[in-house]
Amino acid sequence: MNISSSNPSSYKYEDYRETADWLLSHTEQRPKIAIICGSGLGGLADLLDNKTVFPYKDIPHFPNSTVQGHVSQLVFGELQGKQCVCMQGRFHFYEGYDIAMVTYPVRVFFLLGVETLIITNAAGGLNPNFKVGDIMLIKDHINMPGFAGHNPLCGHNDERFGVRFPCMSDAYDKDLSSLAKETAEEQGCSSFIQQGVYCMLAGPTFETIAECRALQKLGADAVGMSTVPEVVVARHCGLRVFGLSLITNKVVTDYNSQEKANHDEVLETTGMRTQDLQRMHHQQYLQTATTLVISAGI
Ligand code: HPA
């Protein structure tokens, strides 16, 4: 798909409806839970049973991923008996997608009958107490691209999705977060569960030292390049949201440091290939998220 020449603001209710109806006619699953897997975290979809897989390119109106070699498919299936739909491969603003394309799947989920969105991402740790491998339950966000006018709800408001001025002070569901904390305690993984504020920047550059220091002063605990547009659109149409950040690296805030943020480190942490300890974290991460979905009774 030629991204720059498309005009996603021209998406109409009927486009989302057609996509949803096509999916409903190609699967008998009726998921109430949607999961968006972050960079390197697509393995969550592998945990689903009785899978039905739709490559994005086969789904009418669905944006297609530009990144070669990345999995880009919608997976319907069951997570311990609960029907879920999982996005393996998401769309990022920095790839050149308009913000409305980034969020297209969320409205489709809504029309499928989904009620809860679980969203995961890879993020840099701004909070000095965070360690690489920690999992941060997102309690709030800072929509930095939104400050610059890139809010997915700009433009005509279709009341069939939601109100013109949606509230964002309750974006992340407190009950699901408490449940996640309880689950983490039961599983003995509280030592690497954190809670905090996620700040989205457009990317694709990693942050300068001055930017990291500014974000810390603004009250952000983790920084990344995704999630917020999807959450805004999900809340607009009334979905409950639960968000998790895997802290893949610590940002650099010291001019004397030799460290540099890089994508390999992000992938290494999400893949957890190297160290046993980290591998354990990764598995527990998946398990925590899975158990949460199940025990939430959603
Ligand atoms: N900055 C921005 N995005 C990221 C980072 C980071 O340090 N780590 C993973 N995603």
Image (spheres, rainbow, N blue to C red):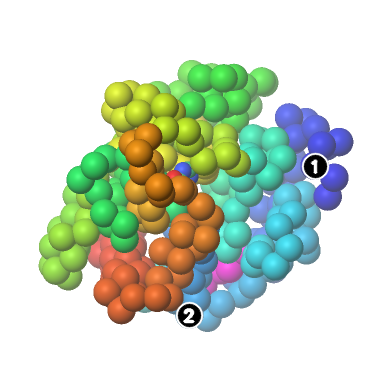
Q: Residue at x 73, y 29 (%)?
A: 9
Residue tagged by mark 2? 49
Q: Is mark 1 within 8 Å of ligand 1?
A: no
- Could you tell which of marks 1 and 2 lies nearer the N-terminus? 1
Picture layout, residue 59 above or below residue 54: above
Query: Is 206 displayed left or right of 55 in the figure?
Result: left
Camera-side residue: 110 or 229? 229
Membership of 243 in magenta stretch: no
How packed mark 1 is, by other alpha carbons closer than 10 Å (few <14, some 14-19, many 20 or more), is: some
SS under mark 1? loop
Q: Residue at x 60, y 53 (%)?
A: 90
Q: Residue 3 carries which label?
A: 1
Bounds of the magenta segment? 74-79
Residue type (three-letter) at the residue carrying disc 2: Asp
Picture layout, residue 74 above or below residue 126: below
Camera-side residue: 122 or 235? 122
